[in-house]
Every structure is written in structure tokens, then in C-alpha cells.
Image (spheres, helix red, strand yellow):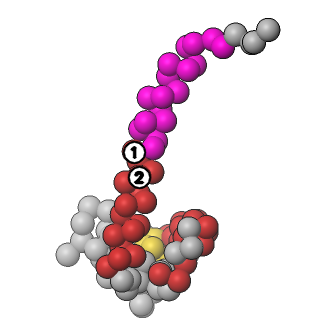
Amino acid sequence: MTDRRGVVAKRAEDLVPGVPYVRGWNRARRSAGTLADQLVLLGLDTDFPGLLADVNVFGGGLVQLGTVRPEAAELLANLITAGLEAELHGTAAETPSTTRRETPAA
């Protein structure tokens, strides 16, 4: 069974001619690298030792997080939530400051 993006499709273990596996894997590799860089900055790189790029049977890239402790998964979810909240509040907070003009102190 496969969802509409092919994510649930099984991993490509036997390659089929004509399927662009390298393109999908390369995209997954870049994304996994970006995530790995952020995890290192947060000191969470050791919590995701199974992070790797992969590809499914249709050539779609996959990023596997591997098996993680529940605390690591919860922390990642909290970080994503905090980032989204900051982005929403940052956008809302920037709107008034861009319309208000600061006058220099004399």
C-alpha cells in the first residue's frame, strides 16, 4: 500500500532500470544533512544515530530518523512546535514595526 506521495512504498532494494533512484536519494541526502546539521547545533545528534537518506521503489527520496528514544522524539516535536510558534509570532510582530518609523534620539 502506498500513500499519494509514495512514502509508504517499500524501500528500493532491487533497482529497476528507468527509475530515477539517484535523484530521489540525492534529495533525501541533502535533507538528511540539513537535519543532521541542526541536530548537531542542538546537541541532539547522538539521539538520532539512525538518521540516513534512502529511496523507495518509485525513486522517491526518504529520510529515515531511525529508532529513537521517546524523549528524543518528544523533544524534536517540541522544537518543531516552538519554531512554528516563533515563526507565527515573528511574522505578526514584524508587521507593526515595519509600518512604524523610528525617530533617532537627539
Residue holding disc 1? 85
Identify the image quadrant of the N terminus.
bottom left
Residue found at the far right of this picture: 106
Badge 2, how many Cα within 10 Å: few under 14, some, many 20+? Answer: few
**Magenta span contains residue 42:** no
**Residue range corresponding to the magenta coloring:** 86-102
- Give how far across and how far down residue 42 sits, in percent: 56, 67
Quickly name the residue at label 2: 82
Q: Which of 70 and 59 is in front in this view?
A: 70
Q: Which residue lies furthest to the bottom in this view?
A: 14
The answer, for residue 95, to whether it is visible in the render is yes
- Please tell me in which quadrant of the rendered image residue 4 appears: bottom left
Q: How crowded is mark 1: few (under 14 residues within 10 Å), some or many (20 or more)?
A: few
**From what the image shows, is residue 74 above or below residue 97?**
below
The dominant secondary structure in magenta is helix
What's the CA distance linking mark 2 and mark 1?
A: 5 Å
Total marks shown come to 2
Residues marked 2 and 1 touching at CB (< 8 Å) = yes
- Which residue: 43% across, 60% down? 79
Q: What element carries label 2?
A: helix
